[in-house]
Amino acid sequence: MVPDHARTPLHALHLELGAKMVPFAGYDMPVQYPEGVLAEHHHTRQAAGLFDVSHMGQAVIRGEARVAALEALLPGDLQILAEGRIRYSQLTNELGGIRDDLMITNAGDHLFLVVNAACKVADFAHLRSELKGCVLKELEDRALLALQGPQAADVLGRLSPPAAAMPFMSCLAQDIAGVPCLVSRSGYTGEDGYEISLPADRAEEFARRLLAEPEVRPIGLGARDSLRLEAGLCLYGSDIDETTTPVEAALVWSISKRRREQGGFPGAAIIQHQLREGPARLRVGIRSLDKAPARAHTQIVDGEGRVIGEVTSGGFGPSVGGPVAMGYVQSAFAVPGTSVSLMVRGTPREAVVADMPFVPHRYRKS
Amino acid sequence: MSTYFTKEHEWVRVTGTEGVVGITDYAQHALGDVVFVELPEVGKLLTKGGEAAVVESVKAASEVFSPVSGEVLTINATVVDQPALINDSPEDGAWFFSVRLTNPAELDGLMDRAAYDAFVKSLE
């Protein structure tokens, strides 16, 4: 347990469940429960895992001009975002770098945002000062739980039938076990699942209700990281930051044709130039050909030993059964199948640039 | 045969001038699920306190230091193939390597079982 760190509404429950607690983004968070990271990872891929992500920032934006105002700060297309639908995007800076990545929901008369814990103070200050004619309200009295895995829909549908029918990347308010929840069909594991925003003072009772279902076990940040790495999803602060653009980060899929053409967001000229000419470097997946995991900051070298990039996330992928990594390489080396070496403790280890995700996404097909 | 322990949670079981080295149950518990181990090459000369091996959990890599100086005689290929054995039997089947001690007097600076157990208790 870490003194002087913030606690989520589930802190006491984590301790009761025997979690090992670590500091993360200013919070005292569970990195694993007694079963351990490997078992938690496999359980999430096979059944359903419950994650406490209440440290993340939640906010709503109100105001007539909210769509145009937020579009001026990010390259995501919010004009075509239908009510009840969710979009992934990135707040950009003047150089096209990523201030944060976030989820935006069209909740009818307002927008609902979920941002990274470590960025939330800066994000909300930025949004407050830049969102013209809108009001941003941080939802500090709400918890956020993720229920992820192939049996997540069975579990939530048992408690609230409408949840099972929700399309991927949609959002629906519903009472579940008597608790008013805002349910998003989304997640950070590559599996089907939900993120559930609910009142903080009901979070523990709700978490206990989910944990009482036979498919559900609590999952810590350790497995959250190995699951998202296998799914090829970026971790802000490691794989993307103020110095990486969405183009370099291979997130172009999250920018619509209209936004690519029209721009109108911070750093648009740089991002449009990279879209036209191709970026100098790209985020890619990397598979090692031996068993040594390559961690973040491992150098990537070519056949002549020249440094061509760096690993930004790497480790053992439990579902892959071996090491997986992602990182940036010079664009000439970004084609899947390109042979590279990873300098692990001074020794070059053979590896190959690989398609991501490393484990196929199993999102709900609409 | 006597077993000695370090404050870095390695053990060395000594018979004559040969020692077998591994990590303790406390160490494996702190590491969590071990998914990879890198052992020294046979013939390598190790110095007491120097890096001898690497163990990796899902999350992180940790160095294992040699409790004694000596030449590596054999390595345990079984733990390379099945790193999870380090979680299952750290102080028995999942030994890392054996060494020929070059300075047996170094053992005087290590802890015996009772002293190590007391040391671990002081960490809790």
Image (tube, rainbow, N blue to C red):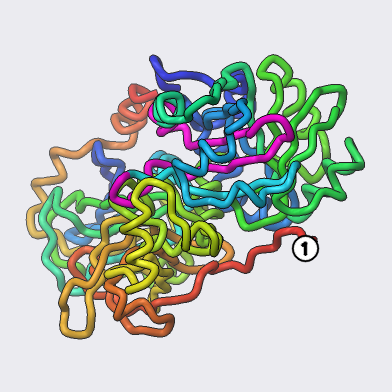
What stretch of residues is rendered in magenta?
A94-122
Q: Residue at x 84, y 31 (%)?
A: A174
Residue B71 lies, in percent from the top left, at 14, 66
Please state which of residues B49 and A82 is positioned toward the viewer in this rendering.
A82
Q: Residue at x 24, y 36 (%)?
A: B7
Whether residue A353 is in magenta: the answer is no
Q: Quadrant of residue A208?
A: top right
Residue B117 lies, in percent from the top left, at 36, 31
Task: Say which quadrant the N terminus of chain A sits in.
Answer: top left
- Residue type at the position of mark 1: Lys
Please state which of residues A358 and A364 is positioned toward the viewer in this rendering.
A364
Kindly tell me whether residue A187 is visible in this rendering. no
Q: Quadrant of residue A134?
A: top right
Q: Is residue A285 above or below residue A1?
A: below
Please state which of residues A53 and A335 is positioned toward the viewer in this rendering.
A335
**Horizontal side of residue A106 vs A356, given as left or right:** right
Could you tell me how many numbered marks the image carries? 1
Task: Say which quadrant the C terminus of chain A sits in.
Answer: bottom right
Q: Secondary structure at mark 1?
A: loop
Residue B34 lies, in percent from the top left, at 45, 55
Residue A136 lies, in percent from the top left, at 54, 23
